[in-house]
Amino acid sequence: MSELDELPPRSRAAVLLAMGLPTEEIGPLVGASGRTVRRWRQRPEMRADICKVRLRLLDGFVKSFQTEEAR
């Protein structure tokens, strides 16, 4: 079981949306329909969560890139 599986459905959806997965694929993964995920995506709080996840992903990438360059 991954850390992602431990998150509530909307949080998992935010992570998967930030990673670029289509709503129709995300729905079954979080126990909702693609239509529900699309509605969630339109909410301001979900948009903010998606932005936060994207920033964390980018930050992790930059740190790993800097670590590789330091070697």
Image (cartoon, grey):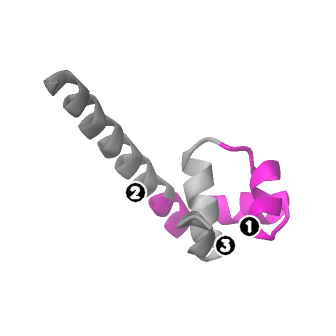
Q: Mark 1 = which residue?
A: 30
Q: Quadrant of the N terminus?
A: bottom right
Q: Percent position (x, y) of residue 6?
A: 58, 75
Residue 16 as seen in the image, left or right of residue 54: right
Q: Which residues are magenta?
A: 21-49
Q: CA distance from mark 3 to mark 2?
A: 17 Å
Q: Amino acid at mark 1?
A: Val
Q: Amino acid at mark 3?
A: Pro
Q: Percent position (x, y) of residue 32?
A: 81, 69
Q: Amino acid at mark 2?
A: Lys
Name the residue rendered at 82%, 50% in the picture. Answer: 24
| Element carrying mark 2 | helix
On residue 9, which mark appears? Answer: 3
Does 23 lie within the magenta span? yes
The numbered mark, 3 or 2, whose residue comes first in the sequence reads 3
User: Can residue 43 be seen in the rendering of this structure?
Assistant: no
Furthest residue to the left? 70
| Element carrying mark 1 | helix
The numbered mark, 2 or 1, whose residue comes first in the sequence reads 1
User: Can residue 21 be seen in the rendering of this structure?
Assistant: yes
Q: Quadrant of the C terminus?
A: top left
Residue 50 as seen in the image, left or right of residue 37: left
Q: CA distance from mark 1 to mark 3?
A: 5 Å
Q: Percent position (x, y) of residue 3?
A: 53, 67
Q: Mark 2 = which residue?
A: 52
